[in-house]
Each structure stands twice: as C-alpha cells, then as structure tokens.
Image (cartoon, rainbow, N blue to C red):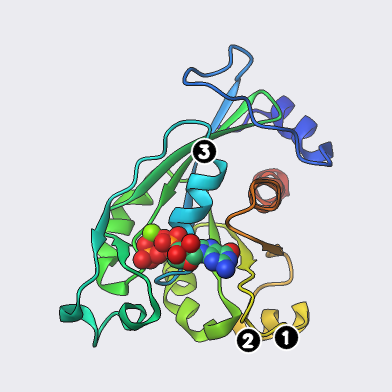
Amino acid sequence: MVSKAASETLAEADPPPVAAGGKYLDSNVSGAAKILVVGPLGVGKTTLIGTVSEIEPLSTEASMTQASVRVDPHVDSGKRTTTVALDFGRLTIDGDLVLYLFGTPGQQRFLPAWQDLAKGALGALALVDTRDLTASFDALGNLEDLDLPFAVAVNVFPSGPRYDADDIRTALDLLPETPLVTCDARDRVSSIRALIALVRHLINVATEPS
Ligand SMILES: Nc1nc2c(ncn2[C@@H]2O[C@H](COP(=O)(O)OP(=O)(O)OP(=O)(O)O)[C@@H](O)[C@H]2O)c(=O)[nH]1
Ligand SMILES: [Mg+2]
C-alpha cells in the first residue's frame, strides 16, 4: 500500500525524483503499489514499462503474422510483435514508494488475462494515441467496469494529431478529476511524470471523504 508519509512527500515532489537503480529494493522503501499500464494495441505500454523500469523488464512478446492481419491492424504498420500475456517492471519513486508495473495485452480478446492482472491493483495508467482515440474505449470501459481509478496519458506520436485537452476529455468521456497528461513512452522523465500524476490521483481518491 502507499503509506501516508510517502504519499505526502510524493504529492509535493516536482520535478520527479530519479528512481533508485539496482536489483534490490532500497531499504527506505515503505510503500508499494501494483499499477496496471493499459491501452489499445501498439499504444506503447511495453515501451513505457521498459523505459521506466529499474530492473530488467519482463516482456512476453510474440511475433505478429499475416494470420492476424484482419484482427490486429498494426501488422501492416511495421509493428512486428505484440504482448501476449503481460509486461512487468518496477519503479521506485521518491526513494520510498515502489510501483510494480503490470502491462496488459492490448487486444480486447485478452480481456480475461487482464482481469486477472487487475487483482490487487490500486490503479491504472491508460495510454492513448490521438491517431485513434476510439481504440481506447474498450480499455477505459474495462477500467470502469473494474472500478479501478486511472489516469490517462497521451503517448505522443509524431504523426498523431494534436487536440486540446478539453477535446480529448470530451472524446474519451473523462470525469473532471481524472488526470490527463502527455508523455513520450520512450522518454523516462515524461513517463515517470505520468505515473506520478496517477499516484497523486490515487492518493486523492484514497483520502477524500466519500
Ligand atoms: N514515435 C513513437 N513511437 C513509439 C512510442 N511509443 C512506442 N513507440 C513505438 O511504437 C511501437 C509499439 O510499441 P509497444 O510498446 O510495443 O506497444 P504496446 O502498447 O505494448 O503494444 P501491444 O503489446 O501490441 O498492445 C514500438 O515500435 C515502439 O517503438 C512513442 O512515444 N513515439
Ligand atoms: Mg506490449
């Protein structure tokens, strides 16, 4: 769980503290949170976890073949592999809070797998791609069905259209309190910032009176 002390320090942290490196957890770690990284096929989930993880990330990539061209359109876009089970990585923020990051498969047909992954999760970072916002509807709907608090991070692709935040909120039907940030899944600082926005939101959700 996220400890109150860790949470308060984190809530004030800006710019994002550099993650502790190394295989073993820092002895100052006093809180932990399981976090899902979700989103549609090819949005950058595996990339983001690999970018921020302080341990060698676990990935379960399998080749995409012509056999899936009708159901996985990215086969024709140069994407060669897809996650078929999960990604896993670990990130310590502010020295004392460790995030265990679980990336889900992107295709809705893997929903049963990511329902299992959601067990024990405190929240989710939902990546979206402005080149196809509708592709995120399934993942966001799944999070709502699971009653899992989430933040939305637009993973900015160079060819992606730029929209105002309000337009993205409307298109995705986000609640006013749902954080909406931008990131580049290949960039460590912006990806950590997105995760911190999520953790701040989780703290607010956990501490606000119901
Ligand atoms: N230009 C750009 N390319 C990116 C970015 N993030 C990921 N990519 C590339 O986009 C491709 C898809 O990234 P993945 O991380 O495999 O996406 P994913 O969401 O894990 O995909 P699935 O597991 O198949 O659902 C990879 O070739 C990445 O190098 C980004 O922020 N910008
Ligand atoms: Mg993946």
Counting other residues with Cα less than 10 Å from the Cα at mark 3, is it few (<14), some (14-19), or many (20 or more)? many
Q: Earlier in the sequence, mark 3 or mark 1?
A: 3
Q: Amino acid at mark 1?
A: Asp
> Looking at the image, which residue is at 48% across and 17% down?
24
Q: In the rendered structure, are the residues bearing label 1 and label 2 in contact, judged by CB atoms less than 8 Å apart?
A: yes
Q: Tell me where residue 207 appears, x and y as whole percent.
A: 71, 43
Please indicate whether residue 78 sits to the left or right of residue 209 in the image.
Answer: left
Determine the image quadrant of residue 64: bottom left
- Judged from the image, the secondary structure of the residue bearing numbered disc 1 is helix
Q: State whether residue 122 appears in this view.
A: no
> Looking at the image, which residue is at 65% across and 31% down?
19
Question: Which disc, if any, is residue 167?
Answer: 1
Above or below residue 154? Residue 91 is above
Q: Nearer the viewer, mark 3 or mark 1?
A: 3
Q: Earlier in the sequence, mark 2 or mark 3?
A: 3
- Judged from the image, the secondary structure of the residue bearing numbered disc 3 is loop
Distance, label 1 to label 2, CA atoms, is 6 Å
Q: Amino acid at mark 2?
A: Ala
Question: Which disc, if any, is residue 171?
Answer: 2
Query: Which residue matches tag 3?
Result: 53
Q: Nearer the viewer, mark 2 or mark 3?
A: 3
Q: State whether residue 189 appears in this view.
A: yes
> Looking at the image, which residue is at 61% across and 81% down?
159
Above or below residue 43? Residue 76 is below
Counting other residues with Cα less than 10 Å from the Cα at mark 1, is it few (<14), some (14-19), or many (20 or more)? few
Q: Tell me where residue 98 appears, x and y as whole percent.
A: 56, 30
Q: Amino acid at mark 3?
A: Ser
- Judged from the image, the secondary structure of the residue bearing numbered disc 2 is helix
Counting other residues with Cα less than 10 Å from the Cα at mark 2, is it few (<14), some (14-19), or many (20 or more)? few
Task: Report the residue that reaches farthest toward the front.
Answer: 78
Q: Nearer the viewer, residue 172 or 4?
A: 172
